[in-house]
């Protein structure tokens, strides 16, 4: 019983631990990209549709509602029906920049894409893992 209590204490502290300085820097850089970068596309940023930094529901240019990104990292990888393959969060962000922003996505192995993924992942901190689950 004592071991169980220690395990719960350990996991509850780790689940909400703040990121180290290197990761925090990547998150901050990703947030800047998310809110400011158009990737040479149609003039929109990620924040154009996924408003309020991705927290809370957003809207597509045609007015259709889209879910928040608050649990995005917790639901990937997931099957993408349109692409007919499993997508990671990195794949999804890459595709969104290409399609939604009509821009040039950062290379899959680039620091810029890692920063974007780090930021979006930070929004899921503390959310339950639900691979292939539904966006909130």
Image (tube, helix red, strand yellow):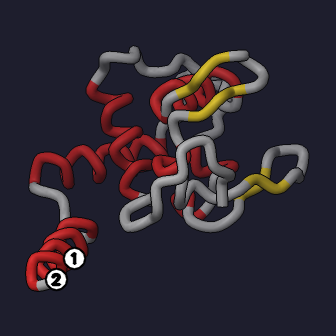
Q: Label 1, on which residue?
A: 8
Q: Mark 2 — residue? A: 5
Query: Are the two marked residues, 2 and 1, in contact with CB atoms closer than 8 angstroms?
Result: yes
Horizontal side of residue 45 vs 12, given as left or right: right
Callout count: 2
Instruction: Name the one closer to the observer, 78 or 27.
Output: 78
The residue at the far front in this view is 1
Residue 35 in view here: no
Q: Identify the element where label 1 is drawn.
A: helix
Residue 63 percent across, percent down from the top left: 88, 52
21 relative to 79 in the view: left or right = left
Q: Give the image quarter of residue 8.
A: bottom left
Q: Is residue 102 above or below residue 36?
A: above
Q: Residues within 10 Å of mark 1 (few under 14, many from 20)?
A: few
Residue at 38% x, 49% y: name it: 119
* Mark 2 residue element: helix
Q: Position of residue 54 (x, y in %)?
A: 56, 57
Nearer to us in this view, 110 or 3:
3
Please state which of residues 100 and 123 is positioned toward the viewer in this rendering: 123
Q: Residue at x 31, y 17 (%)?
A: 109
Position of residue 58 relative to residue 91, above or below, is below
Residue 117, given in percent of the width and then of the height, sits at 39, 39
Task: Classify 5 as above or below 64.
Answer: below
Q: Is residue 28 visible?
A: yes
Work out which quarter of the rendered image holds the C terminus and state it: bottom right
Report the residue at 47% width, 47% height from top. Answer: 73
Q: Nearer the viewer, residue 37 or 24?
A: 24
- Quarter holding the N terminus is bottom left
Location of residue 42 with respect to 121 vertically, above or below: above
The quarter of the picture where residue 69 lies is: bottom right
| Residue 56 drawn at (x, y percent) | 63, 67
Q: Residue at x 59, y 23 (%)?
A: 86
């Amino acid at each position: 019983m004592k071991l169980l209590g220690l395990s719960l204490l350990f996991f509850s502290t780790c689940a909400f631990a703040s990121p180290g300085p290197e990761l925090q820097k990547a998150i901050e850089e990703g947030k800047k990209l998310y809110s400011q970068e158009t990737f040479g596309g149609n003039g929109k940023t990620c924040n154009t549709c996924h408003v309020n930094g991705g927290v809370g529901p957003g809207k597509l240019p045609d007015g259709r509602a889209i879910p928040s990104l608050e649990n995005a990292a917790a639901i990937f990888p997931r099957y993408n029906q349109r692409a007919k393959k499993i997508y990671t969060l990195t794949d999804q962000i890459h595709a969104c920049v290409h399609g939604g922003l009509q821009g040039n996505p950062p290379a899959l192995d680039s620091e810029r894409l890692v920063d974007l993924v780090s930021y979006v992942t930070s929004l899921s901190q503390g959310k339950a893992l639900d691979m292939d689950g539904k966006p909130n």
